Image (cartoon, grey):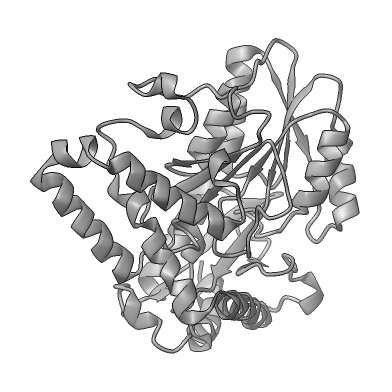
Amino acid sequence: MIDGARDMFVLDPAAAHLNHGSFGSVPTIARDARRQLLDEHDANPMRMITGDLWERTNAARDECAAFLGAEPSLCAFVNNATYGTALALNSLDLAEGDEIVITDHSYNATTLAVGDAGRRFGAKVVVAPVDLGASAADTVAAVLGRFSERTKLVIVDEVSSATAQRHPIAALTEAVHDVGAPILVDAAHSPGMLRAPLSGVDPDFWVGNMHKWAFAPGGTALFRVSQAWRDRLNPLVVSHFHHNGYPANIEQQGTRDPSTWLAAPVGLTLFERFGETEIQRHNAELAAYGQKVLGAALGVEAGELPDPGQGVSMRIIPLPDRLIPDHQAAMLIRRRIADELATEVAINLWRDRAWLRVSAQIYNSPDEYDRLADRLPAFLAAL
């Protein structure tokens, strides 16, 4: 735990919160800033919305873009990575027989969104299997191995949710562009976890949640589009500012709560207070420690514990084969761990196996993983 960090969150002290990767946790300074914005709005909605709201939105967006290493003019606020994925899919001119390539690490909502687009337009979903721990070259080869002349989009996770694996975005972007297709990077976990993830890369579409590792209130993500696509986006909702173009046609809807986006830069001040390098080092090292002690407790050989790649602050541990890889069963086990072991974790299914995923954030400490490691084997044996 980074000294003084736990006091900046309102997390329930009765539980160990080892699942920051699912929804994040809002620090009190960002919560307070958002509360003040809500008070301002509710005191006079007309004044706030018709006053300088959009100038303030521009300023908040610029700060977030700079933190990510992005060009502000190419960025827009959206609610989350799933929304950004839908926006990109809505902007493609899909036709019968077209193909969209994803990997088998794809986030479930992304997989469902691509499948829905396929059903509506007659497009085909093509899945590229990428092994755990695959090299950059092998990852690129796996994706390009599913490419065809009908490929209209490639979607890859920068850090996958199910497997916590970091994929080589720069190499993938270059390779996909070389074969003439656009690429969408699902960077849900990148802001705050990885330093300046948009510096030096130019994917066609990129969307990252600010509310996970960058300490923003929930419902805050940054969508970044390449210059070539900037004026070709089709908004999911057409509103009053449609003819103003990007990013106004994406962001500006009168009844949307503006407080989450405007408060986002306040969360970034934690990186100034504790140091971005120190935060990211602490989190990656602590996640690795948690994986090590939990793997040892469950009898998993060190070589069987996947290394997710540099800077990743989530890790996965394989659960016993006898546990049925069923979504409902996984949800039940997760809830029982929360209730009976007072620990929040994630359990994901991948390649017909259940995997325990733990995260590490500045409010976590090694003893939380130690306590889970002491009690988890007996808990699983009793299932």
Q: Give x and y (percent) for residue 9.
A: 33, 74
Q: Is residue 122 left or right of residue 10?
A: right
Q: Is residue 87 left or right of residue 124?
A: left
Instruction: Note whether residue 269 is visible.
Output: yes
In the displayed structure, 241 sits above or below 306; it is above
Please, is residue 237 above or below residue 312 in the view?
Answer: above
Residue 25 coordinates in the image, percent (x, y)? 39, 65
Q: Nearer the viewer, residue 49 or 366?
A: 49
Q: Quadrant of residue 237?
A: top left
* Residue 345 percent across, percent down from the top left: 49, 66
**Which is nearer the eye, 77 or 248?**
248
At horizontal 44% and vertical 31% (from top left) the residue drawn is 250
Q: Residue furthest left?
A: 43
Q: Is residue 321 above or below residue 129?
A: below
Q: Is 39 on the left or on the right of 23, as rendered? A: left
Q: What's the residue at 55%, 56% (across, down)? A: 66
Answer whether residue 337 is visible to the viewer in this image. no
- Report whether 282 appears left or right of 80: right
Q: Which residue does the image show at 77% across and 77% down from the upper left?
A: 301
Percent position (x, y) of residue 170?
78, 50
Q: Residue furthest top?
A: 96
Quarter-of-image position of residue 291: bottom right
Question: Which residue shows up at 40% across the image and 65% down it?
Answer: 267
